[in-house]
Amino acid sequence: MASKILANLIVMGGGILARAVVQAYRQALANAAKNGVAQETIQNTIRGARKVMTQQEARQILGVTEETPWEEILQKYDNLFERNAKNGSFYLQSKVHRAKECLEAIYQEKGQGPPS
């Protein structure tokens, strides 16, 4: 008898909780629409907008300076990338890769073209 009452309470509580979550989600969408946040998010998604890494941030991640030769940058990249592949996180590994891409583009613009 007690288990039946407990089961009914759990089912009813779950239903109430689900309705509350749906209502809160709808209210959040309404608030976002009022502020224009939803429209901005949709536009950014459509355009594929993303934050671009700065040269300074890329150099900090790889631990290099402006005078560092490309070969040394590649060594630091390989070292950090492999270290994060084994013991680190995918996020850090991604940051290291983006930093190398950023610096690679800068070196290509300067005409110093990174070796293949």
Image (tube, helix red, strand yellow):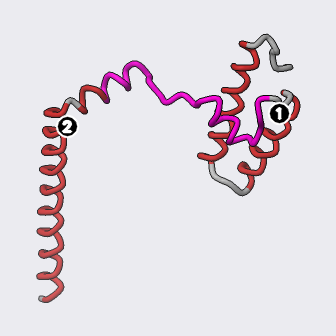
Q: Secondary structure at mark 1?
A: helix
Question: Quarter of the image containing the N terminus?
Answer: bottom left
Placement of 2 over or under 100, stated as above or below: below
Placement of 1 over or under 59, stated as above or below: below
Image point (76%, 46%), residue name: 80
- The x and y percentages for residue 112 are 82, 15
Please tell me which of labels 2 and 1 falls first in the chain: 2
The residue segment tinted magenta is 41-66
Q: Quadrant of residue 67?
A: top right
Nearer to us in this view, 111 or 4: 111
Image point (16%, 62%), residue name: 17
* Residue hosting label 1: 74
- The x and y percentages for residue 72 are 86, 34
Pointer 1 local density, CA inside 10 Å: few below 14, some 14–19, many at least 20: some
Nearer to us in this view, 77 or 14: 77
Question: What type is the residue that disc 2 sits on?
Answer: Ala
Magenta stretch encompasses residue 51 = yes
Q: Secondary structure at mark 2?
A: helix
Task: Calculate the distance from the C-alpha at mark 2 to the C-alpha at mark 1.
Answer: 44 Å
